[in-house]
Image (cartoon, grey):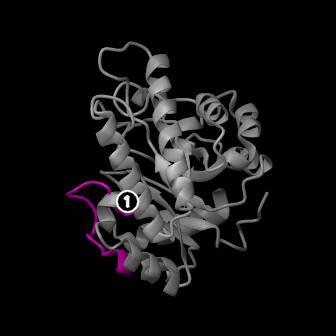
Amino acid sequence: MRDLSTDHSSLALNTASLGHNLDGHGAGWSPERIVDACAARGFGSIVFWRREIGSRAVEIGERVKAAGLSVAGLCRTPFLVGTEATNRHTVIDGAKASIDMAAGLGAAVLTIVVGGVHPDMKGTSESLKIVADRAAEIAPYAAERNVRLALEPLNPVYAGNRSCLTTLRDAVDICEAIGATNLGVAVDVYHIWWDSDLDAQLQRAGNRIFGYHLCDWLADTHDVLLDRGMMGDGVADLKAIRAGVEGAGYAGPCEVEIFSANNWWKRDPGEVLDVMVERFRTLC
């Protein structure tokens, strides 16, 4: 495992951790201010959300490079399946637009949160077939633009409306079935910490692991979407998970992604960043 105690250049900020994911939260910092704050603290990279980028992808990407950082990723494609994704052409067009944005930013990875169970379907198996079909269609377009796509399985509590893809096993199955070298997986502590089959599936994923996301699962979670913990405040075995991820061959950024409407989003963003650095170097 990498020694994070003396070098946190692999630390990446997901900007949602400062409250920029939802309207009405956060300090309202501009991308430029976030870049400067991360550079001053020795972060290696940043992950943005589409809503922050708009038509400024190339401009913001160049600003990140000028500060000595990289864009580790972009969140996310529109849903591929579910109640918001019933029109195939609209879905594919939206996915391609997000790929174009990622390319303009110079983002290493575009994350895919797939969406929930498709209308009039029960269970997840048929919806996952739709995910595979649509991921297969957009993968070549992304490859032409040097964008890697990362399927992110979400905690099963989101299966109905946010992600019918709930296990790393199913994500790797889709990747293997499609066979595109630019299609992989994102491993998020919040969503996979509970999985007793995790180590075996990480080994299966191998060089298809395109992202590793950090936070913690609070034992007394009050809101499954907006009550994530800072690393060390919950029950996830962070070092064991990272050992499995890196043991499978991953050596990329470690992205801190914390949705916390009633705690961290209410704090000064500078304090949040400082705590991230300290927890990353000592607990992750």
Residue at the (47%, 79%) spot, across then down: 64
> Is 82 in front, or is 12?
82
165 vs 195, left or right, is: left
Would you say residue 67 sits in the magenta stretch? no
In the structure shown, which secondary structural element does the residue marked by tag 1 occupy?
strand
> x, y percentage for residue 79?
36, 39
Residue extending furthest toward the bottom: 66
Residue at the (28%, 33%) spot, across then down: 87
Location of the N terminus (image quadrant): bottom right
- On screen, 15 above or below 82? below
Pointer 1: what residue? 49
- Residue 142 can be seen, yes or no: yes
Find the magenta span and give its range: 14-33
- Marks counted in the figure total 1
> x, y percentage for residue 125?
49, 18
Three-letter amino acid code at the position of disc 1: Trp
> Is 72 in front, or is 30?
72
- On screen, 244 above or below 255? above
Location of the C terminus (image quadrant): bottom right
- On screen, 150 above or below 31? above
- Residue 147 can be seen, yes or no: no
> x, y percentage for residue 121?
36, 14
148 vs 200, left or right, is: left
- On screen, 175 above or below 111? above
How many neighbours does mark 1 have within 10 angstroms: few (below 14), some (14-19), or many (20 or more)?
many
